Amino acid sequence: MKAATLVPVEEYLRSTYRPDCDYVDGEVLERNVGERDHSKLQREFIYYFRARAKSLGVHIFPEQRVLVSAGRFRVPDVCIIAGPEPEDQIFHQPPLVCIEILSKDDTLERMQEKIDDFLNFGVRYVWVINPRSRRAWVYTSDVSREVKDGTLRTENPDIRVALAEVFAGFDN
């Protein structure tokens, strides 16, 4: 097993990665992105929320660095902020929702660690969507469950996202 090369946080913060990487306890972790299915679904979520941002009172950010704890920066595929738009270049307050779109190379262990980081930081909802199977899961501090009725939800604010509507653009 190859030993991880530790990088000081200052170096991570002044570096540019394409695509951006997570930073976990000194280790720069590549994210599994770059596949068409992943990209298309990310695009559709951005379009969906951009069209409704004002009426829902939310702001949407793709691939935004979020400081989830000391020494840990996570970069969700999409995050949704309720209320005023943050002014910080790196978010220090929990988003309402972090959306993770699964790539074929994602592992359960790495995804669960990322979900746990978001929830421990105070993110109220983590949505995980598999673009190939079109299955989705919702994680909160209280429960994790598969979405069986085809609708992703939040409370306060009340948001309803019909997966069929998001995937309708995915098929074009």
Image: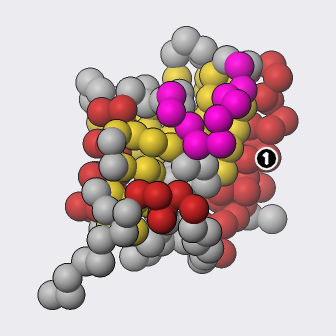
Q: Position of residue 22 (x, y in %)?
A: 44, 60
Point out residue 98 in the picture as x, y percentages from the top left corner: 51, 41
Q: Main secondary structure of the magenta part?
A: loop
Image spot of residue 24 (x, y percent): 33, 57
At x 20%, y 87%, the residue is: 2
Residue identifier under label 1: 47
Front residue of 139 and 94: 94
Query: Would you call the spot at circle 1 few (<14 residues within 10 Å), some (14-19), or many (20 or more)?
Result: some
- Give the total of numbered labels: 1
Q: Residue furthest left?
A: 1
Residue 93 % position (x, y): 51, 28
Q: Quadrant of the N terminus?
A: bottom left
- Apparent side of residue 89 relative to residue 124 in the rendered image (left or right): right
The answer to which of 166 and 154 lies nearer the viewer is: 154
Q: Is residue 170 left or right of residue 138?
A: right
Q: Dot 1: what SS?
A: helix
- Please say whether residue 87 is one of the residues in the magenta stretch: yes
At 41% across and 57% down in the image, what residue appears? 9
Would you place residue 22 above or below residue 29 in this image? above
Q: Residue at x 34, y 39 (%)?
A: 69
Range covered by the magenta-colored residues: 84-93
| On screen, residue 140 above or below 148 | above
Q: How is the image coloured?
A: secondary structure
